[in-house]
Amino acid sequence: MYGCAKIDDKAHPGELMTRIDTPFDITLLEEEWLEADGFGGFASGTVGTLRTRRYHALLLAATRAPGGRVVLVNGVEAWLEANGARYPASMQRYAPDLVYPDLTPTLLAFDTTPWPTWRIRIDASTTLVAELFVSKATCETVLRWQLEGDTASLASSAFTLKVRPLLSGRDYHALHHENPAFDFNAQVSADASGASWQPYGDLPVVHAVTNGTYAHAPDWYRNFCYVRERERGLDFSEDLATPGVFSFDLSQGSAVMILSTSTPPTAAAAHATALAQTELQRRNAFPSLLQRSADAYVVARNQGRTILAGFPWFTDWGRDTFIAMRGLLIATGRLDEAEAILLEWSGVLSEGMLPNRFPDYGDTPEYNSVDASLWFIVAVHDYLATAHASTATQTRLRAAVEAILMGYTHGTRFNIKASVADGLLDSGVPGVQLTWMDAKVGDWVVTPRIGKPVEVQALWINALRIASAWNAQWAPAAERALQSFHTRFIDRDTQALFDNVDADFEPGKLDRSIRPNQIFALGGLPFPLFDIEKGSATAQAILDQVEAHLLTPLGLRTLAPSDPAYRGHYGGTPLERDGAYHQGTVWPWLLGPFVEAWLRVHGASTADVREEARTRFLEPLHAHLNDAGLDHLSEIADGDAPHAAAGTPFQAWSLGELLRVERLLAGLPPAFD
């Protein structure tokens, strides 16, 4: 039910154009919904039906799962004609700042359960119900409209629904503009209920099957305005093509439209009903809303599986995949999928490294991370702890772990090598961002962290300890690195930890920035680096420093506000945003390791302690499920209050860490058994 009538010389006479500066607070309707297809494609939009991003679309397909994503159907222009009047069923923003028509006075309700559903008032006794879902089994987008109200009134009036698909045919990162190459030709079914288009020859054919009637009427809708893109300092105006209009008689029953790139069915209404039944059964099988939301990120890659880092613009990143899967899959018992992901990624080991990401197009992985491979080892540990793996799988995964440790011990790309001097892990070269604090603009790496970053050491020591469980040769290396860590990372003035030692490979150069990375010495990993049970003063000091300087309701800041480099707001141009990304911006996923550290220090075995942790730290995250990306958690938030959400509205490791910590607070072990 997306799109809206165009603002140009062909706009409908007598209809009111509503300016954004009216008293209605339209931002309340700009929370976003997501419907993912399991192959990297998805549909998404807003509660108020305004498309605010270039990524909002009804049919966005992955041509080479999970990458090669293209936008095919951006939305639809929908309205109802009855008793000589026209009632909008969608609205849109046009440049410079016009909303037309205004749906807000008649939009009664919206819900995401079981899928996005809108209720729109037509008159005192009639309501239009519109719903949309993506079938994970078939990658089809199903739209349905039906009237509710007084039976006699519905029977005595003629209600005609009109729907115009709005098409582009572009890379999902790009924007589309009016051009003569767009192919408006339609292949129309014999009964005129369906039509197919191929806007550009190198793109999939778009099929629309309905229980209505299609009339070919090609035209352009111009100057759609995407405010989220404008806020991000990017191009924000787009033109879309509409090849024709579908008409439906709602007095005879519901209207159905199915959008897909696959061979269309012959009976739209029956097919939509079958898809809805299958999809409803699938969704109802999840034990909780969080687990249902988690399913969106699990997608196909080659013959295996992977995890998308977030929607709408991320693909699968190694670091994000291995962090997120601990909560999304292992803690929730989806062990077959966890195994498939670990095996899929282990097949791209190179020089002891796993890639940090695959590009949108092509299969050439990018090896530019020191920690992705170490997070893989942590995920392997959690998975093997479930005792689910076969002997063959155990052998393959352990071999991958051994290859990583051997590569890191003897040296691999980017100066990644265990130090001969202290057994800790060196890494870094100028111009390459290797840790999770990976913002880069041109040749500028915002937080280079060359040397021995603190969380990399925690990961390295954990990886050595994990492997020593089946190969004793790694135990001495783990013990030596741990002793060096205690000697070199504790700040004697605060008893907390330095963020980096031997910074820029200068022996003894220390980075005293107060950042959240030190929390991984206490939580977020299988083995804490301090003897917490014996009342370690350093453990308490770390926790106190992080809580005092970095803790917010939505996660941990990436830099203390007292630091001159602190940036409390994430916004503006790409340069401004990347400059703030890890310089104070809040990350919800970091609440996972923080809460685990807090539980370890305060005594996780006590029910009262767990309840306090749930109330203090998790309730704000649960409240955030109703904001920004509905039923999901955002990627980041402002460091300054009120900590407005930013970045991707749907982030895998944010949700994964919430699920993992929920398990800890239930008094259960980290891994499913």
Image (tube, rainbow, N blue to C red):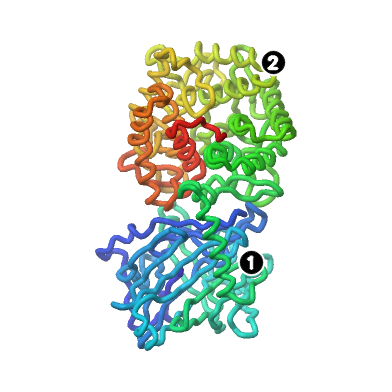
Of the residues tagged 1 and 2, which is closer to the observer?
2
- At horizontal 65% and vertical 19% (from top left) the residue drawn is 468
Residue 318 falls left or right of residue 227? right
Quarter-wise, where is residue 367 in the image? Answer: top right
Front position in the image: 601 or 332: 332
Residue type marked 2: Gln
Q: Is residue 230 above or below residue 406?
A: below
Give x and y (percent) for residue 400.
70, 31
Compared with 283, 455 (above or below) is above
Direction left: furthest residue = 23
Is any part of residue 514 visible from this angle? Answer: no
Report whether residue 242 is seen.
yes
Dot 2 alpha-carbon crowd within 10 angstroms: few under 14, some 14 to 19, many 20 or more: few
Residue at the spot x=52%, y=64% of the render?
A: 58
Q: Which mark is residue 261?
A: 1
Instruction: Identify the residue position indicated by label 2 in the image.
Output: 473
- Based on the displayed image, in which of its 4 quarters is residue 3 positioned? bottom left
| Left or right: residue 623 compared with residue 223 | left
Q: Is residue 672 left or right of residue 237?
A: right
Mark 1: which amino acid?
A: Thr
**Where is residue 458 drawn, in percent x and y?**
54, 23
Q: Position of residue 394 (x, y in %)?
A: 70, 31
The residue drawn where x is 60% and y is 61% is: 139
Return the x and y of residue 21 as percentages of the image width and height.
Answer: 28, 64
Give the position of the C terminus as an image quadrant: top right
- Left or right, residue 147 beside residue 465: left
Q: Nearer the viewer, residue 146 or 423?
A: 146
Q: Secondary structure at mark 1?
A: loop
Q: Tag 2's secondary structure?
A: helix
Mark 1: few, some, or many residues within 10 Å (few <14, many ≥20)?
Answer: many
Nearest to N terminus: mark 1 or mark 2: 1
Residue for point 69% across, 50% down: 362
